[in-house]
Image: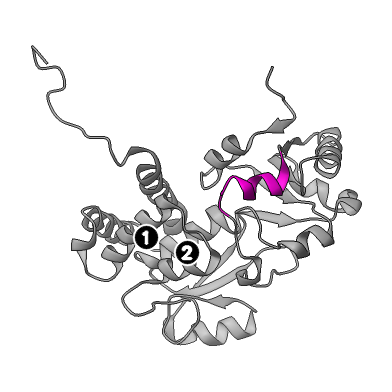
Amino acid sequence: MPSTTEITISQLSRLIGLPHAPAIVDVRIDEDYRADPRLLPGSLRRDYRAINQWASGYRGKTVVVVCQKGQKLSEGTAAWLRHDGIDAQKLESGSAGWKKAGELLIRPYKIPPREQQGRTVWVTRTRPKVDRIACPWLIRRFVDANAVFLFVVPSEVTEVAQRFNATPFDIEGVFWSHRAETCTFDTMLEEFGLQSEPLVQLAKIVRGADTARPDLAPQSAGLLAASLGYSRMYRDDLPQLEAAMALYDAFYRWCRDAAGETHNWPTNKPGT
């Protein structure tokens, strides 16, 4: 009978990157973390010994707890969270099993410093179109689900970044930006280590739409058209970002699950 307190590697892998993916809590001890500091996508390190201080922040969420081997630390932490009324499971085989299965792992030293509430803060130009929506989508789905995005006039991006300890992206002269013929989305995939087949395919679509090269992928023209449409529908950048997240969710699911599917009309011709 399947366990109700444990999630398998394959089950969690299918959930990561989706809008309602569980929150992932990494409770590995420092020794295990130093041996391999890479993190499951979207996960956040927590001290299991201080669970009373951070557990309440997960109320109303589904949580997966990860330790090194999926044994005592994740078992105990998940049990404690359930005691507090939180839907929590441990990951079978832990971080070691995830790594052995060849699943995605994030390079933590590439993640910007977090503010007091544990969120990363990013800043870019106002009126986003393609890259400045694609990158927030990637960050919220695979790096930091609670990330803060500040959209400011182009001339103030650098100063705002300095004053508010925010990380600038998709402007000239910063780390997180275009490189040669690739766009900022490509840069983030490379630097974070997010090189899965669906994300690489999505990156090609984004690159074609963002750099006026629709020949890179047949879907690039459609993404550009939808992106420009969203920019006309919303005057405020944040509601536009929230609405357009679903667009990238759909493109990601197409890349992951439906790229080989076709559609035609009529579907029920006699004799077929």
Left or right of 226 in this view: 100: right
Left or right of 22 in this view: 30: right
Q: Which mark is residue 203?
A: 1
Residue occupying the point 42% across, 82% down: 154
Give neighbour class at mark 1: few <14, some 14-19, many 20+ (Cα, 10 Å): many
Q: What is the quadrant of the C terminus in the image?
A: top left
The answer to the question of whether label 2 and label 1 lie on touching residues, with beta carbons closer than 8 A, is yes
Q: Position of residue 91 (x, y in %)?
A: 70, 39
Foreground residue among 32 and 202: 32
In the image, residue 14 above or below residue 192 = above
Numbered range of the magenta stretch: 93-104
In the image, residue 179 above or below residue 37 = below
Q: Secondary structure at mark 1?
A: helix
Q: What is the quadrant of the N terminus in the image?
A: top right
Residue occupying the point 75% across, 41% down: 59
Q: Position of residue 147 (x, y in %)?
A: 60, 61
Can residue 20 be seen in the rendering of this structure?
no
Q: Position of residue 239 (x, y in %)?
A: 46, 57
Is 96 one of the magenta-colored residues?
Answer: yes
In the image, residue 120 above or below residue 54 = below
Can residue 266 be seen in the rendering of this structure?
yes
Left or right of 108 in this view: 32: right
Residue occupying the point 27% across, 57% down: 229
Residue occupying the point 13% across, 27% down: 265
Residue identifier under label 2: 189
Name the residue furthest left.
270
Q: Secondary structure at mark 2?
A: helix
Name the residue furthest front.
100
Is 42 one of the magenta-colored residues?
Answer: no
Q: Position of residue 270 (x, y in %)?
A: 8, 12
Foreground residue among 124 and 17: 17
